[in-house]
Amino acid sequence: MDITIRQAKPDEFEVVGEITVRAYLDDGVLDYGESDPYLPELRDVAKRAAAAEVLVAVEDGRVLGGVTFVPTGGPMADIARPGEAEIRTLAVAGEARGRGVGEALARACVERARATPGCVRIVLSSQRSMHAAHRIYERLGFTRTPGRDWNPIPHLDDITLLTYELTL
């Protein structure tokens, strides 16, 4: 496996957005499928890149997956507190799953968090159904933080995001 993790280029934003949408749809985490109101947000990689770091996993010039790394706070942080970095929208193309791409992306975020001055922890939120992602996080040493679990859409009681953290 010769996968490179690097910052996404603007001409890759569209493919990263589509990989993210497809991953969320394939994992069944969007309540309204193809008409889910969150899809435009998932596709808007340019918005994420303007406020955080969007990283991609690339092999032979082809984007296999992406992740948003939020170094410390800012508009892209959902749950990060002072001194915490955050991982968001980790997604791997269907044909690349099971090849270590997701773990490589998560590892790159951990390395970036360790290199961020004043950062003592990295956190993330995940859907209950994303079992493969949970295994990756646990392999990397993340632990569940049930006290931080949260609902991004308060009027829908059935959506609770699970949270994880890794002390650096």
Image: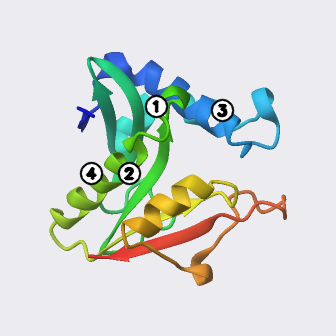
| Circle 3 SS class | helix
The reply to whether discs 4 and 2 touch (Cβ–Cβ < 8 Å) is no
In this view, the mark in front (4 or 2):
2
Residue where numbered disc 4 is placed: 108
Q: What amino acid is found at the position of numbered circle 4 in the picture?
A: Ala
For marks 4 and 1 on the same chain, the one whose residue lies earlier in the sequence:
1
| 85 relative to 43, above or below | below
> Image point 38% across, 51% down: which residue?
103
Category of crowding for the residue at label 3, using alpha-carbon neighbours closer than 10 angstroms: few (below 14), some (14–19), many (at least 20): many
Is residue 60 placed above or below 64 in the rendered structure? above
Residue at numbered disc 1: 96
> Can you identify the residue that label 2 sits on?
103
Q: CA distance from mark 4 to mark 1?
A: 17 Å
**Residue under numbered circle 3:** 39
Residue 2 figure quarter: top left
Q: In the image shown, does 67 or 134 lie closer to the viewer?
A: 134
Which numbered disc flags the more N-terminal residue, 3 or 1? Answer: 3
Tag 2: residue type?
Answer: Glu
